[in-house]
Structure formats: structure tokens, C-alpha cells
């Protein structure tokens, strides 16, 4: 806990509550990414919106929970399901700062989410269009609406800055 790189140089955003568009919800997901950095976790954040309400907010906690499934999206989907008392998140939208990995992309389909909005594409592990597209499986009945690139610059900056510091710190 003593490493200097825990100090996050990025500040949280305070978006206007008046216009609740994709940028508004992604700002909240970005704020979760800032929280992740403050816990010395890879800064990825997620929000789930349903009917104009935020029903879940989570960030990557793989290290603190020592759990390979503790990605922001999984934690957010679990929270959202508890909030509404139903594993089917029909009608809900997931906002996440980085394209979901194979596990999380699969879970978004299993949860029957309506939409997934992500900021930064991931050509290595992204499974909603980056490396491959699980949403395009030909025999799957449920398909997600996908939007990409919302707040891409900000969400990429915080990720890149984090990894730059980690590489510079031999203890990290
Ligand atoms: Zn994931």
C-alpha cells in the first residue's frame, strides 16, 4: 500500500443531471474507474441504467477480492440483479469504460441486457466487436444493441496512464 502510484492524477467528473444521455452515464462509469485506481486496481468502471435510474455502479476489484471474475461488469450485473430481484436485466443498459472481455461479454448476453455502451475498444480481448463479436453468434436469439466510442479519449487516457506508471514501478 506504500507505492506512490496509488495516487490517481485523474479527477472525478460532475456531469449535469439535466441531460441523461450516453455521455452522462459514461461519466459515472469513468468515475468508477477513478475509484478503481484509488484502490490500485486497473481503472475500469461500469454503470447499469434502467428507466433513467442508476441501479448498479462498480469497478474492477480483481486484486482486492482476489477473484478473477471480479471485473467491473460482472460486479455491476450482480448488483443490478439484486437491486431489481431478477437475473434478467431486460431493458437495462451497461456502460463500461473498456470493451467487455470474453467472460463479461458472455454475461451481458446471459443477462439479456438491452444495450451495452463501451468507451475503449479492445482488439486483444474485446468480445463485442474488438477481437471477436459474441453478439453476432448466429443461433443466439437475444442480441444486444451496441454503442462504441463514448468518452473514448478520457477512458483510454486513464488506462494508459495507469499502465505507464505500473511499468515504471518495478514493485508494481
Ligand atoms: Zn471482463
Image: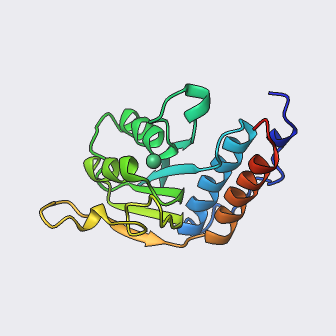
Q: Quadrant of residue 24?
A: bottom right
Question: What x and y, as percent, mark residue 11?
Answer: 80, 53
Nearest the viewer among 151 and 21 is: 151
Considering every residue shown, the one lying at the far front of the view is: 170
Question: What x and y, as percent, mark residue 9?
Answer: 84, 52
Q: Quadrant of residue 86?
A: top left
Nearest the viewer among 80 and 144 is: 144
Question: What x and y, as percent, mark residue 164?
Answer: 76, 55
- Identify the colour scheme used: rainbow
Q: Which residue shows up at 38% across the image and 64% down it? A: 128
Q: Which residue shows up at 58% across the image and 35% down it? A: 61
Q: Which residue shows up at 73% across the image and 52% down it? A: 162
Considering the image in quadrants, where does the C terminus appear? top right
Count of number-bearing discs: 0
Q: Is residue 5 left or right of residue 81?
A: right
Is any atom of residue 91 visible in this view? yes
Q: Quadrant of residue 142?
A: bottom left
Q: Is residue 47 left or right of residue 172?
A: left
Question: What x and y, as percent, mark residue 123?
Answer: 48, 67
Q: Is residue 156 left or right of residue 74?
A: right
Is any atom of residue 16 visible in this view? no
Considering the image in quadrants, where does the N terminus appear? top right
Amino acid at each position: 500500500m506504500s507505492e506512490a502510484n496509488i495516487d490517481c492524477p485523474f479527477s472525478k467528473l460532475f456531469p449535469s443531471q439535466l441531460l441523461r444521455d450516453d455521455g452522462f452515464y459514461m461519466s459515472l462509469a469513468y468515475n468508477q474507474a477513478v475509484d478503481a485506481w484509488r484502490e490500485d486496481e486497473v481503472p475500469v468502471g461500469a454503470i447499469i441504467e434502467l428507466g433513467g435510474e442508476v441501479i448498479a455502479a462498480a469497478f474492477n476489484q480483481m486484486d482486492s477480492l482476489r477473484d478473477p471474475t471480479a471485473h467491473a461488469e460482472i460486479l455491476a450485473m450482480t448488483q443490478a440483479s439484486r437491486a431489481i430481484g431478477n437475473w434478467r436485466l431486460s431493458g437495462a443498459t451497461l456502460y463500461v469504460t473498456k470493451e467487455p472481455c470474453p467472460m463479461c461479454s458472455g454475461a451481458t448476453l446471459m443477462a439479456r441486457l438491452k444495450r451495452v455502451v463501451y468507451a475503449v475498444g479492445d482488439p486483444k480481448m474485446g468480445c463485442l466487436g474488438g477481437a471477436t463479436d459474441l453478439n453476432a453468434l448466429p443461433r443466439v436469439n437475444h442480441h444486444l444493441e451496441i454503442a462504441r466510442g463514448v468518452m473514448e479519449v478520457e477512458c483510454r487516457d486513464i488506462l494508459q496512464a495507469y499502465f505507464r506508471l505500473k511499468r515504471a514501478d518495478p514493485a508494481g
